[in-house]
Image: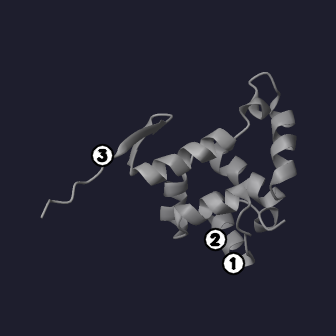
Amino acid sequence: MSAHMKKPLIKISVGKEIFKLPHKEAQAVLAIVKSINYSNYSKNKTAEVVYKEIAKTRPKGAVYLRGIRTRENMSQKKLEKITGIPASNISKYESGSRKITIPIAKKLAKALNINEKKLSS
């Protein structure tokens, strides 16, 4: 009987981070990256223009959360440690794929020292 051979992991770098993923997951990541239209994020656009473009596809609370977290130079992991909300959920709130409920808005607002109503809109 032959021994089962593991397939090598594929390295993917995003910014300064390097991830090693199995082939199928690497293909999924590649498909997501290819689906992003980078021309929408031109460096020649003002912050206001970029904000308006992003706000068209995401709830205001999601955009506000990402903006405040970024302004405070706080990673999703750090926010997770402060609030107890998993970073994966924070990512979903910021992308608009998950609704920010009132209890979650309260936790996030307390951690970021902001008004919770800004997040639940």
Tags 2 and 3 touching, CB below 8 Å: no
Q: For mark 2, give the secondary structure.
A: helix
User: What is the quadrant of the N terminus in the image?
Assistant: bottom left
- Residue located beneath label 3 in the image: 8
Q: Nearer the viewer, residue 64 or 15?
A: 15
User: Between disc 3 and disc 1, whose residue precedes?
Assistant: 3
Q: Is residue 101 above or below residue 74?
A: below
Label 3 crowd bin: few (<14), some (14–19), many (20+), radius 10 Å: few
Tags 1 and 2 touching, CB below 8 Å: yes
User: What is the quadrant of the C terminus in the image?
Assistant: bottom right
Kind of residue at badge 1: Pro
Residue 27 x %, y %? 51, 47
Q: Is residue 28 above or below residue 107?
A: above
Q: Which residue occupies 79% across, 21% down?
A: 44
Furthest residue in direction bottom, as rendered: 103
Q: CA distance from mark 2 to mark 3?
A: 41 Å
Residue 103 x %, y %? 69, 78
Q: Is residue 12 visible?
A: yes
Furthest residue in direction front, as rendered: 1
Furthest residue in direction top, as rendered: 44
Q: Is residue 11 left or right of residue 67?
A: left
- Residue located beneath label 1 in the image: 103
Label 2 crowd bin: few (<14), some (14–19), many (20+), radius 10 Å: some
Q: Nearer the viewer, residue 1 or 90?
A: 1
Q: CA distance from mark 3 to mark 1?
A: 43 Å
- Residue located beneath label 2 in the image: 107
Tags 3 and 1 touching, CB below 8 Å: no
Kind of residue at badge 3: Pro
Kind of residue at badge 2: Lys
Q: Is residue 99 above or below residue 114?
A: below
